Image (tube, helix red, strand yellow):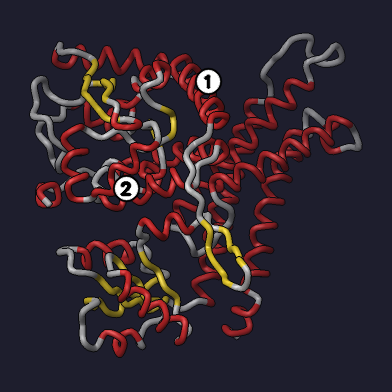
Amino acid sequence: MKEALKRFQKSVLTLIAFVMYALNMAIFFLLFSIDNPEIISLSRTAAVTLSTYVIFLFLLSAIYGSFDAGKRKEKETAFSLALAAILTDLVTYFELTIMKTNEANNTHFKLENIGILLLVIFLQIIVVILFTKLGNAFYFRVNDREKCVIVTGEEEGTADRVRRAFDDFSKRYEVADVVSCKDEELFQRLLAADTIVMYDVPVKTRQRIVDFSYQNLKSVYYNPQIADIIEQHSKPVVIDDISFFASEFHLIGFEERILKRLLDILVSVLALVCLSPLVLISAIWIKQYDHGPVFFRQKRATVHGRVFEIYKFRTMKENSANRSVTTDDDRITVPGRFLRKYRIDELPQFINILKGDMSVVGPRPEMLENVEEYTRELPEFAYRLRMKAGLTGYAQIYGRYNTSSRDKLMLDLMYIENYSILKDIQILFRTVLVLFKAEDSTEAFSDEKRKR
């Protein structure tokens, strides 16, 4: 029975996803048809409203992630799907409201059916949660946990860090063994694995393990090196009868820089206007708490190593030592903990973006001391200065505050090498998710980790 279900796994999960999306759409149209019967009849209003709903649901699902049962944490999947549904509801609701602004209905723009909108959102969230649980239950019913063998290099503490990462997905993965890449019985121990996970393994050894995995039909995960990131957008080329992968060197072009700058100006102006009440409240709170300065300024590095002064809300006591934040850091004030948790302390950087010091999306600007230290340890760290520093980026979406400098570097280089204006827009939308996993994304360095 289990094998039969596994054979049709994709079809079943597709059906579950289709029913969930269909139910959400039915909830929206049936409830709003109470006061707007034209949206479920053959009419121009119905066609436009349906098109708006489907197009935005498709686009937002592509941005936040589709119904990928078993691949992400259940909470993250449910939240992503719910957020896509809610934003689709809001866009379609405003489109419907605009269409009703005419001589036959409302002579001026008027928000109505707010109660119905809130009911629609509530019911859709329930549907998303139930179907996410159903999809995950089915996935883990037909798929056994993958037995993973973790292969590590010589860096101290790596094995524990990788194990913790996979333990967070314990429903999908079972860490069966951890072995050094120099172990004499390495390949014998790999036979027990369904999936081989490599971290900081030398390239030659990694290639041998990849060949072994291909021969023995085992899945492989490995953290990327610079060459792997460059390979991502390589093109297969055959010259005469010799096959190559061609990866042409490129930087962001002139037209792309113009589009990126226009996006920066638009987003920063909208953000400063819309978030001005929050900015004002934060400034008053900081000032009232200890009567110190509201803003914190610090020199940071941006594109080509150019130094600028970054603006942030002050979250620490005055005249605090200049170093990275650690767990239970006594330098952080009471308002500061809240502002840091929800990234509110970063809002003044929209002023830096307007000035042209920063971009909305790009590698985070590091403290000058960190740039020097990281570049000594990782000469490749200088590559991230090929693009203007940003407020958000891959490292902010997928990493934490205490993610290692090497892993942050790889995330930044993945962004730089795969840059597009559409990618920037996707990152902007996905940044919203970071605010709802504040505990993870702002987790500080432990004292031990900071010293490494």
Q: Residue type at mark 2: give it.
A: Leu
Residue 247 location, x and y as percent? 50, 55
Q: Residue at 35% across / 22% down in the picture? A: 349
Q: Residue type at mark 1: give it.
A: Leu
**Which tag, 1 or 2, sits closer to the chain's start?**
1
- Secondary structure category for the residue under label 2: helix
Residue that numbered label 1 is attached to: 266
Q: Which mark is residue 70?
A: none
Residue that numbered label 2 is attached to: 409
Front one among 349 and 277: 349
Q: Residues within 10 Å of mark 1 (few under 14, many from 20)?
A: few
Residue 435 can be seen in this image: no
Q: Residue at 56% across / 44% down in the picture? A: 63
The answer to whether 167 is drawn above or below residue 419 in the figure is below
Front one among 389 and 172: 389
Check contact, mark 1 vs mark 2: CB within 8 A: no
Q: Residues within 10 Å of mark 2 (few under 14, many from 20)?
A: many
Residue 411 location, x and y as percent? 38, 49
The answer to whether 422 is drawn above or below residue 95 in the figure is below
Q: Residue at 66% across / 43% down in the picture? A: 57
Q: Which part of the image, by quadrant, shows the N terminus?
A: bottom right
The answer to whether 3 is drawn above or below residue 295 in the figure is below
Residue 168 location, x and y as percent? 33, 62
The answer to whether 391 is drawn above or below residue 279 in the figure is below
Relative side of 229 to 25, left or right: left
Front one among 193 and 73: 193
Residue 307 can be seen in this image: yes
